């Protein structure tokens, strides 16, 4: 039986953090045996809110690629590639932009929250939001469908994007009377949302509230020690009422492959500071093999670039196949 196709990716806005690790990298590594896997470094998407600092995006392309490989993404099994190197994605985005209304994009809850976070870029009430940023879910629909993906492993914040992709695919098929794409499905991991160390809704590269996978043990310890907690004294797992301490318990449980409630009851005799020390030590031990592999990769950037070039070639071939079908369906195959 032919393998189904998987696409997922990361924005090169910074090195990856433990939210990515537990939320998506582990999943990718586990799934690469059973799926024809594509992993995209989303530089074009990163530019939608970093258009004024292209060097930031450029610097982080290799960082994100190295994080994936160090976490166990195997270039023999997964195709790792850079979004901007596939011009067919841009072409498909243009066609899709006719199939969605501006109002639908404005209502997307993730886009809304991100516009509100980026006031210096998009204005106090989002009045200066760009066409490109508002439209990034459309471009994401093109990323997913250019390889005709069936499954898209993502964190919780990306669910509305997959919904938009499904709407666009259905409309495309109906409008142009064809059946080119599988209807893609989101796949959430067991930890679809790690919150920030500052207690904010999501650990994120852009918010400076993360333990980066490549952080050294001392930095990791400092960050965990100063992670925000409530003024309580008992350790429990109760994300609704006590989100910060519960998030730390969740990270501990993920390291130990435990149910977070069991982890909390095992930890209940610890003070907050004892628990934080234990957590930082365990996290450092858990990430040691990753960090060793990451240092090896940092010493051979050419090897990483070769992997991305191999990926480009593979994706271009599939993308052109897709676009032939699309142009034919849209009657622009002159
Ligand atoms: P940025 O702030 O630039 O958007 P990010 O930290 O949100 O960066 P992305 O590259 O946008 O990272 O996301 C890559 C993948 O990781 C997505 O599938 C996203 O849902 C998932 N992800 C991001 N942050 C978390 C988190 N805190 N917990 C679990 N999954 C996450
Ligand atoms: Mg993001």
Image (tube, rainbow, N blue to C red):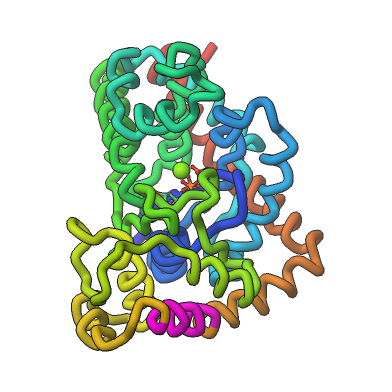
Compared across the picture, whether 148 is left or right of 64 comes to: left
In the rendered image, which quarter contains the N terminus? bottom left
Q: Is residue 189 visible?
A: no
So how many labels did they put on this image?
Answer: 0
Q: Position of residue 61 (x, y in %)?
A: 67, 48
Magenta segment main secondary structure: helix
Q: Nearer the viewer, residue 96 or 222?
A: 222
Name the residue rendered at 64%, 26% in the picture: 51
Q: Please say whether residue 164 is one of the residues in the magenta stretch.
A: no
Name the residue rendered at 28%, 46% in the picture: 185
Compared across the picture, whether 128 is left or right of 231 comes to: right
Q: Position of residue 18 (x, y in %)?
A: 48, 64
Name the residue rendered at 60%, 62% in the picture: 67
Quadrant assignment, res 194? bottom left
Q: Is residue 263 above or below residue 135?
A: below
Name the residue rendered at 61%, 38% in the picture: 43
Q: Is residue 234 visible?
A: yes
Q: Is residue 264 above or below residue 147?
A: below
Q: Is residue 314 above or below residue 77?
A: above
In the rendered image, which quarter contains the C terminus? top right
Q: Nearer the viewer, residue 250 or 11?
A: 250
Q: What is the span of residues highlighted in magenta in the rendered image?
A: 274-284
């Amino acid at each position: 039986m032919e393998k189904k196709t998987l696409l997922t990716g990361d924005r090169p806005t910074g090195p990856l953090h433990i939210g990515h690790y537990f939320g998506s990298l582990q999943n990718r590594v586990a799934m690469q045996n059973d799926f024809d896997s594509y992993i995209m470094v989303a530089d074009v998407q990163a530019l939608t809110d970093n258009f004024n600092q292209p060097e930031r995006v450029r610097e982080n392309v290799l960082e994100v690629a190295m994080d994936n490989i160090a976490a166990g993404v195997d270039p023999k099994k997964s195709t790792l590639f850079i979004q901007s190197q596939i011009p067919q994605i841009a072409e498909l985005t243009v066609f899709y932009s006719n199939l969605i209304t501006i109002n639908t994009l404005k209502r997307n809850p993730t886009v809304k929250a991100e516009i509100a976070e980026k006031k210096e870029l998009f204005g106090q009430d989002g009045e200066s939001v760009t066409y490109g940023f508002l439209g990034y879910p459309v471009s994401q629909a093109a990323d997913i469908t250019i390889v005709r993906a069936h499954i898209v492993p993502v964190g919780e914040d990306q669910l509305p994007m997959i919904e938009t992709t499904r709407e666009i695919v259905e409309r495309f098929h109906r409008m142009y009377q064809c059946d080119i794409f599988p209807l893609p499905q989101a796949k959430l991991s067991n930890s679809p949302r790690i919150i920030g160390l500052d207690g904010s809704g999501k650990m994120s590269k852009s918010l400076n509230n993360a333990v980066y996978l490549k952080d050294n043990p001392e930095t990791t310890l400092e960050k965990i020690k100063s992670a925000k907690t409530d003024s309580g004294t008992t350790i429990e797992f109760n994300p609704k009422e006590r989100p910060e301490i519960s998030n730390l318990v969740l990270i501990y449980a993920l390291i130990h492959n435990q149910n977070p409630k069991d982890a909390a009851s095992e930890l209940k005799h610890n003070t907050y500071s004892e628990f934080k020390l234990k957590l930082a030590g365990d996290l450092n031990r858990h990430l040691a093999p990753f960090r060793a592999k990451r240092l090896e990769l940092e010493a051979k950037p050419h090897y990483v670039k070769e992997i991305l070039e191999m990926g480009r070639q593979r994706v271009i071939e599939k993308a052109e196949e897709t676009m032939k079908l699309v142009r034919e369906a849209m009657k622009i195959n002159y």
